[in-house]
Image: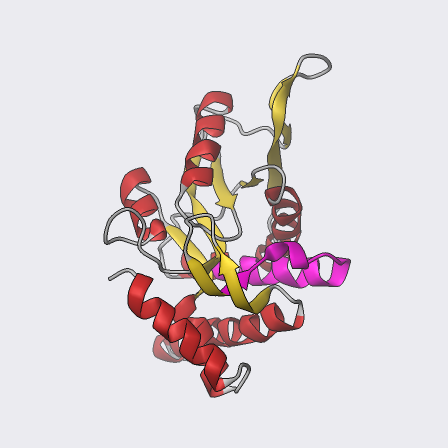
Amino acid sequence: MSEQQKHTGKEADFKSYKSKFVPFLLDSGALTFGDYTLKSGRQSPYMVNTGAFNTGPKLSRLGCFYAKAIHEKIELGILPQAPDIIYGAAYKGIPLAAAVAIAFSCVSDEEVGYCFNRKEAKDHGEGGRLVGMKPQPGQGILIIDDVMTAGTALRETLDVLRREAPEARILGCVIAVDRRERGTDKLSAVAQAQYEHGFPVFSIVDIDDIVAALKADKLATPAEVAAIERYLLEYKAE
């Protein structure tokens, strides 16, 4: 097989996992349509809630989608290396980190650790705020989150990691869905986070992938799709 054929095969595999993720969001009840007030105060016609992945099979599949997105970014050179540790912030990030560490270890055939933070430092036993594999100097940490709205949660996570594991390296951050909405500037929250922190922030899918799948496979009504498109005309980042 030629290098071109290998590359084409990889692209097809990457597109395949993205196209499968949108129906999975819908089937799991994680992607819903309606009238939702976001933390930003905006009225959104759709909502992504990863708390809906509330069974073992759903969480297992979600971990596999994250793992494929991470593997893609390593293959494309966007991530400099495979992570040594997957980090999830309490509380939503705890099951995500565990699921992704399991899935990525299977995909990569490498042992990948995971850790998360306590909301308050433990003053007995081993102490400290990190639970799980404690990051060692030089180890690469990949942060896991669900949806980035303004980047506040990522800044808080970085504060914890820089205090508790100052000699570890932050490789990047991966989220489930990039809404691609403007933050305080013309940039999206994801683009702003990349600019601010100097590492890649990427998603399994973004809202453009979702809209394309909704249209192609008729996964939503024309009115639901039109409502999302009107919303994006007003709030989508450049």
- The answer to whether residue 9 is above or below residue 187 is below
- Counting from the top left corner in percent of width and height, residue 139 is at 48, 34
In the rendered structure, the answer to whether residue 82 lies left or right of residue 238 reads right
Instruction: Using the image as rendered, state which of residue 44 and residue 123 is in the foreground.
Output: 44
In the rendered structure, the answer to whether residue 194 lies left or right of residue 220 reads left
Give the magenta part as a residue range.
46-69
- The answer to whether residue 196 is above or below residue 191 is above
Q: Quadrant of the C terminus?
A: bottom left
Q: What's the colour scheme?
A: secondary structure
Q: Residue at x 32, y 61 (%)?
A: 235
Residue 6 visible in the snapshot? no
- Counting from the top left corner in percent of width and height, residue 50 is at 60, 56
Q: Residue at x 61, y 52 (%)?
A: 100
Residue 22 visible in the snapshot? yes
Q: Quadrant of the N terminus?
A: bottom left
Instruction: Using the image as rendered, state which of residue 98 and residue 214 is in the foreground.
Output: 214
- The answer to whether residue 238 is above or below residue 95 is below
Residue 185 belongs to the span the image colors magenta: no
Residue 67 belongs to the span the image colors magenta: yes
Secondary structure character of the magenta stretch overall: helix
In the rendered image, the residue lying farthest to the top is: 123
Q: Residue at x 40, y 43 (%)?
A: 151
- The answer to whether residue 212 is above or below residue 135 is below
Q: Quadrant of residue 90?
A: top right
- Counting from the top left corner in percent of width and height, residue 27 is at 66, 73
- Counting from the top left corner in percent of width and height, residue 176 is at 51, 58
In the rendered structure, the answer to whether residue 57 lies left or right of residue 131 reads right
Q: Residue at x 62, y 60 (%)?
A: 62
